[in-house]
Image (tube, helix red, strand yellow):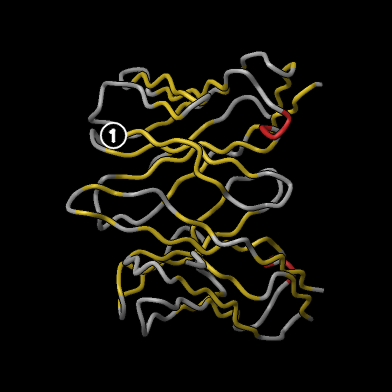
């Protein structure tokens, strides 16, 4: 079974600075998807960024980028120019590329605080 | 488009009562799933469906039933509520195009308290 580990329960960053959230996962599969989701106090789950394991190029979405290290099974999220609206819980999630295996496996989350 | 709509947003049940959490999506997504979120834990999969008429168990299915008679709707039934089912419940949907999986769209959640 796959597992996802987020080893930083809480992180804080000064507004306009850069912060990196860590995520590692364990799998024996070679093809899969990885996601970062943001959950603000409204509790809505918002997709931040996704990565396909077969792609070597790291995904980017505006101020958000990932460092995907497949061999190390690491998938960190970098937030540049942090803004107050980035304050939230961030969850890393794994999904097999096997379409008969419909399951997102989540980490326990990292609470990000933005310091004005 | 409304996306994924969950009702109700809040619910308090007494132990032993039954209820149905509603989930509807208007995006014609084939995949739908239910997760629960407990403090200090990530979301855990309860049940899922890969299409109308097809459902399967996830990681924590005990005490819950699902059915999927249409593409749009995927209700979650609590048969006899227990305090251990106090949680926030999320419905999610997704779809594929060929072999490409798009990201999941989540509903806004239902906070359920069982007393």
* Residue at the (44%, 25%) spot, across then down: A75
The quadrant holding residue A114 is: top right
* Residue at the (53%, 70%) spot, across then down: B62
Which chain is mark 1 on?
A
Quarter of the image that includes the N terminus of chain A = top left
Quarter of the image that includes the C terminus of chain A = top right
Label 1: few (<14), some or many (≥20) within 10 Å? few
Towards the viewer: A97 or B99: B99
Residue A74, relative to residue A103: is it above or below? above
* Residue at the (66%, 13%) spot, across then down: A17
Towards the viewer: A48 or B39: A48
Number of dots carrying numbers: 1
Which residue in the rendered view is the most extreme toward the front? Answer: B1
* Residue at the (29%, 21%) spot, across then down: A57
Query: Residue A7 at what x, y percent from top left?
Result: 60, 25
Query: Residue A52 at what x, y percent from top left?
Result: 30, 34
Q: Is residue B70 left or right of residue B21?
A: left
Q: Mark 1 points at which residue?
A: A28
- Dot 1 falls on a residue whose secondary structure is loop
Towards the viewer: B2 or B105: B2
Query: Residue A65 at what x, y percent from top left?
Result: 46, 23
Residue B52, relative to residue A15: is it above or below? below
Which residue in the rendered view is the most extreme toward the top? Answer: A17
Q: In this view, does B86 lie to the left or right of B29?
A: right
Query: Residue B77 at what x, y percent from top left?
Result: 56, 80
Q: Is residue A112 left or right of residue B22?
A: right
The quadrant holding residue A21 is: top right
The quadrant holding residue A74 is: top left
């Amino acid at each position: 079974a796959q597992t996802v580990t987020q080893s930083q329960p809480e992180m804080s960053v000064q507004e306009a600075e850069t912060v990196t959230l860590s995520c590692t996962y364990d799998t024996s599969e070679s093809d899969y998807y990885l996601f970062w989701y943001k959950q603000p106090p409204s509790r809505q789950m918002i997709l931040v960024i996704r990565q396909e394991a077969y792609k070597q190029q790291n995904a980017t979405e505006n101020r958000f980028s990932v460092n995907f290290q497949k061999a190390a099974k690491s998938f960190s999220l970098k937030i540049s120019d942090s803004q107050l609206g980035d304050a939230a819980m961030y969850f890393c999630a794994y999904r097999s590329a096997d379409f008969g295996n419909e399951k997102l496996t989540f980490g326990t989350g990292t609470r990000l605080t933005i310091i004005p | 488009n409304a996306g994924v709509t969950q009702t109700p947003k809040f619910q308090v049940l007494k132990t032993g009562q039954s209820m149905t959490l509603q989930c509807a999506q208007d995006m014609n997504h084939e995949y739908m799933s239910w997760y629960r979120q407990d403090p200090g834990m990530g979301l855990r999969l309860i049940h899922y469906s890969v299409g109308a008429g097809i459902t399967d168990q996830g990681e924590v299915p005990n005490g819950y039933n699902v059915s999927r008679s249409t593409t749009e709707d995927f209700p979650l039934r609590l048969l006899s509520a227990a305090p251990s089912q106090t949680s926030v419940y999320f419905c999610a949907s997704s779809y594929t195009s060929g072999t490409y999986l798009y990201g999941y769209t989540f509903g806004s959640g239902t906070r359920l308290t069982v007393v």
